[in-house]
Structure formats: C-alpha cells, structure tokens
Amino acid sequence: MLRTAIAVATVILGMSPAIAAGDPAAGEIVFKKCATCHAVGEGAKTKVGPVLNGVFGRTAGTLEGYKYSKAMIDAGAGGLVWTPETVQHFLAKPRDFVKGTKMTFPGLPNPQDEENVIAYLLTFSPDFVLPPPPAQ
Ligand code: HEC
C-alpha cells in the first residue's frame, strides 16, 4: 500500500508534457495486443480484463461488475487513478507497477507504443480532461 502511494507520488511529480504526443491510428494497431483481453468502443463487453471505455479518470479497480484482483482494488484504495502517466507506467511493467495484478501482460517495451496506445484509448475517454501541471 505504502509502495503504491510512493509510486503514485513519483508519477505525479514526474509528469511529462510529452505524453500528448501519441498517434491514435498507430495506437489502434498496438491495441491488438490488448484486445485479447480488453474491449473498447460501443457495445464493448468484459473479456479477461475490464472494458477500457472511460478508463482515464477512473480509480484503479473500480469498474462496476468487473472482478478485479485484490492488488488492483488495493491500488485504487491507495489513490491510484488512471491518467496517461499512470497508465504509461503500468503498461511498461504491469506487475511491477501494481504488484499482484492479475493482468498477465509482460508490458510494452517501446515507450512510443505506450504513447500511441494511450492516445488511442483517450479517444474512448471523451470526458477525461488532463490534470493541470503541478505548481512550480
Ligand atoms: C492477458 C490479458 C491482458 C492483456 C493482453 C492486457 N490486459 Fe490489461 N488487464 C487485464 C486484467 C485481467 C486486468 C485486471 C487486473 C487486476 O484486477 O489486477 C487488466 C487491467 C487493466 C487496466 C486497469 C483497468 C481498471 O479498470 O482499473 C488497464 C488500464 C489495462 N489493463 C490496460 C491494458 C492495455 C492498454 C493493454 C495492451 C497494451 C492491456 N491492458 C493488455 C488483462 C490483460
């Protein structure tokens, strides 16, 4: 729990403006790697993983009707909210970022792929507004 809080704080402090640089079209291709387990778009249904519509701004582990691991629920209770930054850290090494997650995905080795898939997923989170940059 403490570890999660530290990870979240680190992510927030390290917020990079480069994140908006992803390409949604390229991200749609990257998403094929996720699509075995996740659906997005109209009529998306739970697969092995939760539906990712509206995932940005969602507290980790809180989509109604999906059975998360205890690790993911605890991460959300510890303050983990999905933003482009936290999703990017998660995707780099899911099981390091949320220890004990049942997302058995090794991670995306290429940061450009992460940015692109995030840009693609952002198109399914129309209500999400990027948080303001931290005060200097
Ligand atoms: C092998 C199946 C699998 C693959 C592939 C996979 N995921 Fe997941 N994902 C899961 C599962 C299962 C969970 C729920 C984890 C938990 O409860 O610990 C999850 C959770 C998540 C969450 C947190 C959602 C929430 O509501 O808290 C995000 C974000 C996510 N995945 C994004 C992705 C992206 C983006 C990709 C592709 C780059 C991907 N996943 C690939 C199975 C997968």
Image (cartoon, rainbow, N blue to C red):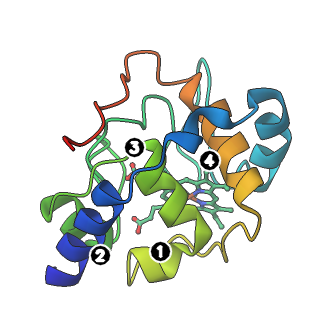
User: Quick check: marks 3 and 1 in contact, CB under 8 Å?
Assistant: no
Question: Residue under circle 1?
Answer: 102
Q: Is mark 2 within 8 Å of ligand 1?
A: yes
Q: Amino acid at mark 4?
A: His
Question: Residue under circle 4?
Answer: 38
Cα separation, mark 4 vs mark 3, equals: 17 Å
Closest to the camera, between mark 4 and mark 3, is 3
Q: Secondary structure at mark 1?
A: loop
User: Quick check: marks 1 and 2 in contact, CB under 8 Å?
Assistant: yes
Question: Residue under circle 3?
Answer: 83
Q: Amino acid at mark 3?
A: Thr
In the rendered structure, the answer to whether residue 34 lies left or right of residue 81 reads right
User: Quick check: marks 3 and 2 in contact, CB under 8 Å?
Assistant: no
Cα separation, mark 3 vs mark 2, equals: 18 Å
Marked residue nearer the N-terminal end (3 or 2): 2
Q: Which residue does the image show at 37% across and 16% down from the upper left?
A: 127
Q: Is mark 1 within 8 Å of ligand 1?
A: yes
Q: Amino acid at mark 1?
A: Lys
Cα separation, mark 1 vs mark 4, equals: 13 Å
Camera sees residue 36 = no
Marked residue nearer the N-terminal end (1 or 2): 2
Mark 4: few/some/many CA within 10 Å (<14, 14-19, 20+): some
Question: Residue under circle 2?
Answer: 71
